[in-house]
Image (cartoon, coloured by chain):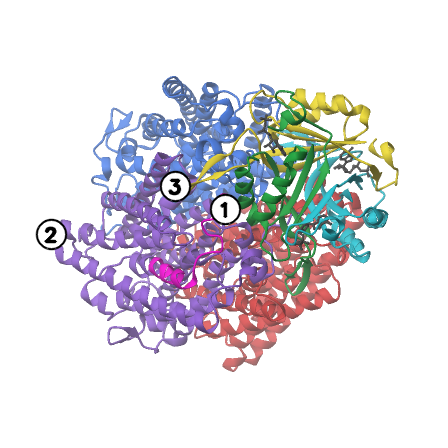
Chain colours: A purple, B blue, C red, D yellow, E green, F cyan
Amino acid sequence: MNSAINAGDTAWVLMSAALVLLMTPAVGFFYAGMVRKKNAISTLTMSFVVLALIAVQWILYGYSISFGPDVGGVIGSLKWAGLAGVGQAANTVYAPTIPHLAFMLFQMMFAAIAVALIVGSVVERIKFSAFLVFALAWATLVYDPLAHWIWGSGGWLKNLGYIDFAGGTVIHISAGVSALALVFVLGKRKGYGADNMEPHNIPHVIMGAALLWFGWFGFNGGSALAAGGLAASAIVATTASGAVAGLVWMLFTWRSRKPSALGFVTGAVVGLAAVTQGAGYITPGAALVIGIVAAFCSYGAVLLRMRLRIDESLDVLGCHGIGGIVGAILTGVFASTAVNPAGANGLLYGNPGQFMIQTLGAVVTIVFCFSATWVIAKVIDVTMGLRITDNEEVVGLDMSQHAETAYSLR
Amino acid sequence: MNSAINAGDTAWVLMSAALVLLMTPAVGFFYAGMVRKKNAISTLTMSFVVLALIAVQWILYGYSISFGPDVGGVIGSLKWAGLAGVGQAANTVYAPTIPHLAFMLFQMMFAAIAVALIVGSVVERIKFSAFLVFALAWATLVYDPLAHWIWGSGGWLKNLGYIDFAGGTVIHISAGVSALALVFVLGKRKGYGADNMEPHNIPHVIMGAALLWFGWFGFNGGSALAAGGLAASAIVATTASGAVAGLVWMLFTWRSRKPSALGFVTGAVVGLAAVTQGAGYITPGAALVIGIVAAFCSYGAVLLRMRLRIDESLDVLGCHGIGGIVGAILTGVFASTAVNPAGANGLLYGNPGQFMIQTLGAVVTIVFCFSATWVIAKVIDVTMGLRITDNEEVVGLDMSQHAETAYSLR
Amino acid sequence: MNSAINAGDTAWVLMSAALVLLMTPAVGFFYAGMVRKKNAISTLTMSFVVLALIAVQWILYGYSISFGPDVGGVIGSLKWAGLAGVGQAANTVYAPTIPHLAFMLFQMMFAAIAVALIVGSVVERIKFSAFLVFALAWATLVYDPLAHWIWGSGGWLKNLGYIDFAGGTVIHISAGVSALALVFVLGKRKGYGADNMEPHNIPHVIMGAALLWFGWFGFNGGSALAAGGLAASAIVATTASGAVAGLVWMLFTWRSRKPSALGFVTGAVVGLAAVTQGAGYITPGAALVIGIVAAFCSYGAVLLRMRLRIDESLDVLGCHGIGGIVGAILTGVFASTAVNPAGANGLLYGNPGQFMIQTLGAVVTIVFCFSATWVIAKVIDVTMGLRITDNEEVVGLDMSQHAETAYSLR
Amino acid sequence: MLKIEAIIRPDKLSDVKDALEKIGQNSMTITEVEGRGRQKGVQLEWRVGTYTVEFLPKTKIEIVCEDSEKQGIIDAICAAAVTGEVGDGKIFVSKVTEALRIRTKEEGTESLK
Amino acid sequence: MLKIEAIIRPDKLSDVKDALEKIGQNSMTITEVEGRGRQKGVQLEWRVGTYTVEFLPKTKIEIVCEDSEKQGIIDAICAAAVTGEVGDGKIFVSKVTEALRIRTKEEGTESLK
Amino acid sequence: MLKIEAIIRPDKLSDVKDALEKIGQNSMTITEVEGRGRQKGVQLEWRVGTYTVEFLPKTKIEIVCEDSEKQGIIDAICAAAVTGEVGDGKIFVSKVTEALRIRTKEEGTESLK
Ligand SMILES: Nc1ncnc2c1ncn2[C@@H]1O[C@H](COP(=O)(O)OP(=O)(O)O)[C@@H](O)[C@H]1O
Ligand SMILES: Nc1ncnc2c1ncn2[C@@H]1O[C@H](COP(=O)(O)OP(=O)(O)O)[C@@H](O)[C@H]1O
Ligand SMILES: Nc1ncnc2c1ncn2[C@@H]1O[C@H](COP(=O)(O)OP(=O)(O)O)[C@@H](O)[C@H]1O
């Protein structure tokens, strides 16, 4: 083993990987509680299976094309396919004090949850087999390149100076925007706008949100790739933004009627998503501001989506996408090298250039993810069909796709 | 970053903070499973929202008045408000090997869970808005000063030699006693003693208890503020006490009828609460004794409360309060500098003085928390009203306070 | 404190202990979701109570007879009973860089979960009191000796060169085989094969599986007893095997009908169990192979069990036992000192001897566990009776054994 | 024989059960239902929008009894279930032509004992 | 008075409720049930085996009304609940001899208002 | 037409369903209920106190059929649901005046097929 490996840093990153692992099934509960009973298993399963699917993809080639030796700034080569050369020693470029395998594992969890987030937009009507194909294609053709551009050594956005601490762009913008594109191809749920589609189990939603918040400590704190002041600072920023955004969302729902539990947890997730990009570059005070702004924007976005009668069912764009975009741009405002010397100064610290870069990176991501996802979805729809039949939708996906029922009466 | 920062210690404390974070929603599930279905969301939400509320309070001023520069032994100053001066370097007074922000974060989680514990006494009838006001007032006027007295540098009880390793007094006695005071102002649930108020979802209670036990590893182990022998010793003591108290409670319920699942998890929580004060000062053997004694006392206390027909609904006093008191006093018996040189010797090791100090500290805490909480509750009751209307109570707080239902039939 | 204690390693092992702790109630949810509603509490409680029972047993004498000073290669002495001499300093034989108490604690969690796994075979019909007696007897007479043979310093299988990284044999084979022996004494559930015994709550099963996977990071990663490359490598292997086995099982269920959520999580658990033995000795590629082979074998085993109409109700043998056996033997094929110099080379690396040893160890474990468990079960059945009455079984164990109901209608 | 169907507030079930016990009526079947009548539903929230859940949880009690026992049962239920607020519920009575105890094959009013 | 019992698809409940509201019928009781009729059950999986769950989730609506209101209610339910596929459900009508509002002790059709 | 209401042990549902299938009766509606009769409730625990839950889970089967089919159905249910222990349940029969298939508007016994 490389003598430069630090046990404390390694313990922290491994633990963080475990925390992010838990977020993938947690997203499943967060979403499953919001669908109708007859689609609970379907929603849980799509989220959870993604973890297994992406784990295998990541080992076989995903990690290599994301983080492997750069090819022209746009993609990694296949040199690290099957984890060739990815061992117990550190990779000094990515994380000099932890085993390369630990870094690879931590990134695997990010790839998995990005896909799982998209599930929220397609629940209650997507064909399970088509979803699996989509997941694999999206991870390979959208997520992996994007991760390379922004995080991969030699990636063109990284070289440009784009900073994304823990995946605000790579994960949250990409998942949110892709969710919308996918829905444009997939279409609305049967009965959307007419039938009552109330959440069937709010405790599940709350359990999911609690585990997500818990996991986010690893998500953002682990992205420091070391157990020190930066990790602590990132987690404090994370908590600040999540907390304040949850409260603000709750106040919005209160103004319109009553303080909603669903509103609170939604807001918390928005705040956590929004702070992800900047967590390791900003002060706790800036995190509070980001949380508040993100809550406003996402509340508005969800309202708008409902007016437009777009069935992006559980608001992946409205929560993660908008949160991510707000975070990406405000990182260009609030980033400070006083917090993280390896980062950059933002607008507020006299560096409008960073603000421009952040905006550019966000826009590029939006355009790329939307169009690439739309194409992938169309191809799948034309070839194997994205959507189940009307009858299958009426009976519910638990029965029609999995031949199971979530709760038995007996 | 300060060169004195130890990555292993930092990883441990950050992870412990994550574990304690999870305890706040876990308490929500522990409690929510014991109320009627119509109040499940209300119970979950009160617990969870507290996390967000206190996180913001703690950043803005709570941490400063608890741990900031001492003013007369009774309160911290506002010098650290907004986390001014609380950075990535260590604070050598509180925790010399971890970032100051990590210490602040860990303590934030304690402040949050203390408030969340109180929820158990007021479920099914408190007005949500009044609860939020109470939570903020209680954290500011009761918790923060108490934390300063016992843990803050310069705090008068600390100076006196009072030892509380992980919050047996600061969190468990204070929450338990305050819960009682609050109930005296709030009154009984409509139909208490007449209506059937059986727990609506025991798996929720068990899930909550499991996550609490899991979190307690961070609660007590993290309080060592370093990853070494002391943390290990504290966790072993924690497990010993929780385990034996759970078994003893279960035997009590068995004697009177059948071994109850609810009895087992209640006992486990009692044992975990009781050992909190001494965890880092005592041997595993002493922890077993503390667990047994606490189980006896708390079982008796719950029995007594029911005889007196006091609707301290989910026994915050009977579990956490009594557990905390037993633990505070027995720490004065069993503490040993052989376990922790930074601690003190107790009665058993020839130091009756420590026993006196522990008893005094517990009594002071009881008197202070009871009276301060009573006053806060009265003021809120007179001004905005603590309690919902009878009709709202009949319909349930989920509908009346949040306009949501936990489970849908469809 | 011993100066050799490494904070990073300690943080990792303590955290791993917390993760494994959570697996015991997680197994409860995994199992409880698969039984009928009327036995949900019973199933949860058996799993959870075991944690408390074994914690106390382990402190009092279990650890000592498992890991204490060797007596003739077959058992530890009682020198460490009551944790005498087990302190904050490291035990250089077992884990030179962490407190001895941390090692003891980590092992405690393994002892607890081994017993909890067995619950899956006896649900819905075992007498609670008899189960407690069985649990204690099994831990003392089966688990503790076996752990000594394989892991204890001086243990005869260890001396022979048998390698079991994280308990594939000690925990999974032993639990699986013992489950079968116990069922042979206990008998089938009333109505087995005739009544519909569908799982009552699949989200519980999924929650349990998610927490198990999360915990397995500690299970296998923590077994490195240090936070470095080996831990990372073990976790990567763990994830690879769990993921691929989950997918393969799902494909099996798909081939016969539909992709089953239950099938997916079952397969994941099988893969995780199978890789446990070799996790710290093999490459990720070997882990993928182990996962696939284990999925095949366990699917076949479950099919066979159902054909034979043996009511080993939730397939502890089929999942953990078969997974463990496959893992034990394939470790003898794939183990490599390139991965872990402290390990051994397997068949593939030119060492058929290791293959023989692994096979021998697995066979010895199967024979020992089956016969010892059968005897224990028989003795309990003859003296106090293992099984509840028919009426109690019809009413359900929640009511008959615990006087509680899991879910209330109100 | 008659079937008395009472739809009451869930919270009142234990009172009603006690009241029925006092007049010697131990047998009954309980169903968890949702309903609306005079008491209309409430508005619930869906993130930023709102929707109305029109149905409140109620408990249905079904008792099959002899014609002569009817009035006593109705009176007992009414007395125990009333709060005076909208939403107290309804009682419906209908005819039952046959009754049978599965265990013993006793028929008619014999089977109701 | 009559009791109309309609067993419909759960998804159709809100449509049916709206349709009933339009004709002024606000009162009803809802029960979550399972059923089978023409529409047979589906095969479900138990790890490696399969079993058939023969019952699909349905929603039962019960309305007690005056005889004269019957046809309007039935028509409204039918129009709103129909999809034309097997599994749309059934409506059964039976006699109710008495009705009583617990709160006010109003009897008969008075109590149904 | 008649409505047969059987309240049985939940565990017996699959046996009863099979028995009914054998005599060609596939249609039915199932409700999860709680009940008490001869079989009294059990004592449950609330931490240190105890309370009695008087109701045990039961399953209600409702079948609407032609008068002529009644006896066969009752016999099938009885044979399959009986254990001989207290708590086996009850069967109640009442008159149904109309029946209608929502999908096709078929009425009467036609709609029951
Ligand atoms: N006509 C009806 N048919 C069926 N159920 C009814 C009818 N009227 C009332 N109910 C049931 O009775 C419950 C209470 O009725 P409601 O009118 O709210 O109370 P109140 O009679 O005290 O005004 C309703 O929620 C519903 O379940
Ligand atoms: N004879 C019957 N007795 C009781 N319930 C019935 C009967 N026939 C149908 N049902 C109920 O109606 C539901 C729908 O009936 P089904 O025959 O599937 O629809 P359709 O009439 O459109 O073919 C069933 O699931 C069942 O709950
Ligand atoms: N008079 C009744 N009215 C309504 N439901 C009844 C009546 N008698 C019994 N039941 C229902 O039948 C179930 C079984 O009845 P019980 O008397 O316990 O069985 P048995 O008839 O075998 O002694 C009860 O739990 C209850 O749901």
- Do the CB atoms of the residues marked 3 and 2 lie less than 8 Å apart? no
| Chain of the residue where label 2 is placed in the rendered structure | A
Residue drawn at (67%, 64%), measured in percent from left and top?
E49
The reply to whether label 3 and label 1 mark residues of one chain is yes
Residue drawn at (22%, 51%), measured in percent from left and top?
A330
Left or right placement of residue B6 versus residue A57 in this view: left
Q: Nearer the viewer, mark 3 or mark 1?
A: 1
Residue E54 position (above or below residue B216): below
Q: Residues within 10 Å of mark 3 (few under 14, many from 20)?
A: many
Q: Residue D81 sits in which quadrant?
A: top right
Residue drawn at (39%, 67%), measured in percent from left and top?
A139
* Circle nearer the N terminus (3, 2): 3
The reply to whether label 2 and label 1 mark residues of one chain is yes
Q: Nearer the viewer, residue C219 or C349?
A: C219
| Magenta stretch encompasses residue B385 | no
Q: Residues within 10 Å of mark 1 (few under 14, many from 20)?
A: some
Inter-mark Cα distance, 3 to 2: 35 Å
**Residue at label 2?**
A350
**Residue A279 coordinates in the image, percent (x, y):** 27, 51
Left or right placement of residue A180 versus residue B409 in this view: left
Q: Secondary structure at mark 3?
A: helix
Residue B407 visible to an observer of this rendering: no
Q: Nearer the viewer, mark 3 or mark 2?
A: 3
Q: Residue furthest left?
A: A350
Inter-mark Cα distance, 2 to 1: 51 Å
Inter-mark Cα distance, 3 to 1: 22 Å
The reply to whether label 3 and label 2 mark residues of one chain is yes
Q: Secondary structure at mark 2?
A: loop
Say the numbered circle drawn on residue A196: 1
